[in-house]
């Protein structure tokens, strides 16, 4: 039954809120529209929406606990070839393994062009036609830096619907506060030769976080440069897997090798996930405070009874005090 909530949301989505059973049935039936609706609810900043998602995950916990997906993060600078790589690797996984694959991609062009949702859908043309693949092309909801605290919830929603491999695209690491390594089992960093800033532009810490370094565009004019960068990185990071690869030249395509490496990496996920859980919960706490203060116009509340003192940190102290008086 549709609920009569006031459908006011910071994010634009245009369907009615339904009861939890509707969403759970849809997820169990792998209904793509319902998966997308659930992810939109997860991305909302409205408490009512978050409560529905919470309820879905609680009631359907048996599904996602039983079906933890292998979570693979694909990151790298803009234009390096992440979406094209996901198209290739995802299609290979979907065809060969017949596993259910969820792709949560970032389409940076969506922020400035109306037809942008089609952008990544065209880049992932073959992949989106696979029956066992779900693609969410604008998984960041146009959030600068790529990931939000909601992405982890979106992964759980896909797992509830039976998706057992998740590919997560993010634009760069170290740029946004929400780090890809807090929500995946393995990080693949794509780099590009010949851009001049290939090494300088990427902080060493970012390299450390990556499990596999892939130098993309090892084809045509950039083939030699890619090999050179590969040698340099192997020298700098002797314990990392460093591979050169091309999305367009089949002779330089290393997708199969990369998949083998991924499989050999993922041994004990549980320990890592326990650590990630702590990070994710901290991110949720921060986001809850931000959303609450934004949605309730906290400034007005703070100043309703007495004016703020002339120094802005008074707002901080008042908020902290009011939180300290709350019970959970
Ligand atoms: N020569 C060559 N071009 C490639 C390769 N992979 C991708 N490209 C091209 O590089 C451009 C960017 O590719 P995308 O796959 O959209 O890159 P991306 O990293 O997802 O880009 P953003 O999402 O915008 O950060 C496109 O024009 C691709 O055709 C490759 O292996 N070799
Ligand atoms: Mg992309």
Image: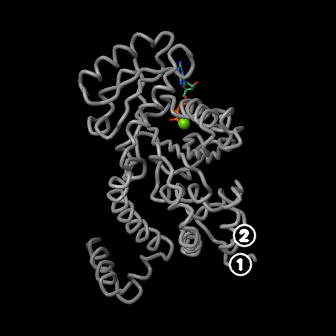
**How far across and how far down the image is residue 131, in percent?**
71, 42
Q: To which quarter of the image does residue 86 belong?
A: top right
* Quarter that holds the C terminus: bottom left
Q: Is residue 172 above or below residue 25?
A: above
Cβ(mark 1) to ligand 2 < 8 Å?
no
**How far across and how far down the image is residue 102, in percent?**
59, 47
Tag 1 residue = 3
Cβ(mark 2) to ligand 2 < 8 Å?
no
CB of mark 1 within 8 Å of CB of mark 2?
yes
Residue nearest the viewer, comparing 82 with 68: 68
Left or right? Give the position of 185 relative to 203.
right
CA distance for labels 1 and 2: 7 Å
What residue sits 57% from the left and 16% below the top? Answer: 250
Residue nearest the viewer, comparing 123 with 306: 123
Q: To which quarter of the image does residue 198 belong?
A: top left
**How far across and how far down the image is residue 27, in percent?**
66, 61
**Numbered disc 2: secondary structure:** loop
What residue sits 64% from the left and 71% below the top? Answer: 8
Residue nearest the viewer, comparing 222 with 10: 222
**Numbered disc 1: secondary structure:** loop
* Quarter that holds the N terminus: bottom right
What residue sits 67% from the left and 72% below the top? Answer: 7
Query: Is the residue marked by circle 2 packed among few (<14), some (14-19), or many (20+) residues within 10 Å?
Result: some
**How far across and how far down the image is residue 179, in percent?**
38, 49
Tag 2 residue = 16
How did the renderer colour the structure? one colour
Residue nearest the viewer, comparing 87 with 64: 64
Q: Quadrant of ligand 2?
A: top right
Q: To which quarter of the image does residue 108 belong?
A: top right
Query: Is the residue marked by circle 1 packed among few (<14), some (14-19), or many (20+) residues within 10 Å?
Result: few
């Amino acid at each position: 039954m549709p609920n009569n909530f006031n459908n006011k949301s910071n994010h634009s989505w245009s369907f009615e809120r339904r009861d939890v059973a509707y969403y759970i049935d849809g997820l169990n039936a792998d209904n793509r529209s319902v998966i997308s609706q659930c992810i939109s609810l997860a991305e909302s900043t409205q408490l009512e929406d978050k409560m529905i998602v919470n309820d879905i995950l609680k009631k359907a916990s048996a599904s996602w606990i039983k079906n933890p997906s292998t979570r693979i993060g694909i990151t790298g600078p803009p234009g390096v070839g992440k979406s094209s790589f996901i198209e290739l690797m995802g299609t290979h996984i979907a065809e060969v393994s017949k596993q259910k694959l969820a792709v949560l991609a970032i389409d940076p062009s969506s922020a400035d062009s109306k037809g942008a949702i089609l952008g990544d859908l065209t880049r992932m043309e073959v992949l989106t036609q696979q029956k066992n693949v779900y693609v969410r092309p604008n998984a960041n909801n146009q959030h600068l830096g790529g990931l939000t605290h909601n992405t982890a919830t979106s992964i759980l929603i896909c797992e509830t619907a039976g998706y057992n491999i998740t590919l997560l695209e993010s634009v760069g690491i170290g740029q946004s506060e929400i780090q890809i390594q807090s929500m995946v089992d393995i990080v693949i960093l794509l780099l590009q030769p010949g851009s001049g800033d290939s090494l300088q532009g990427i902080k060493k810490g970012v390299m450390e976080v990556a499990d596999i370094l892939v130098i993309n565009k090892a084809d045509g004019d950039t083939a030699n440069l890619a090999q050179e960068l590969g040698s340099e990185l192997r020298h700098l990071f002797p314990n990392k897997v460093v591979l050169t690869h091309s999305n367009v030249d089949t002779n330089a395509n290393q997708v199969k090798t990369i998949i083998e490496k991924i499989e050999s990496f993922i041994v004990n996920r549980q320990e890592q996930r326990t650590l990630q859980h702590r990070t994710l919960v901290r991110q949720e706490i921060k986001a809850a405070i931000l959303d609450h203060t934004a949605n309730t116009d906290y400034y007005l509340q703070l100043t309703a009874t007495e004016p703020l003192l002339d120094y802005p940190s008074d707002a901080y102290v008042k908020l902290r005090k009011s939180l300290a008086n709350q019970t959970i």
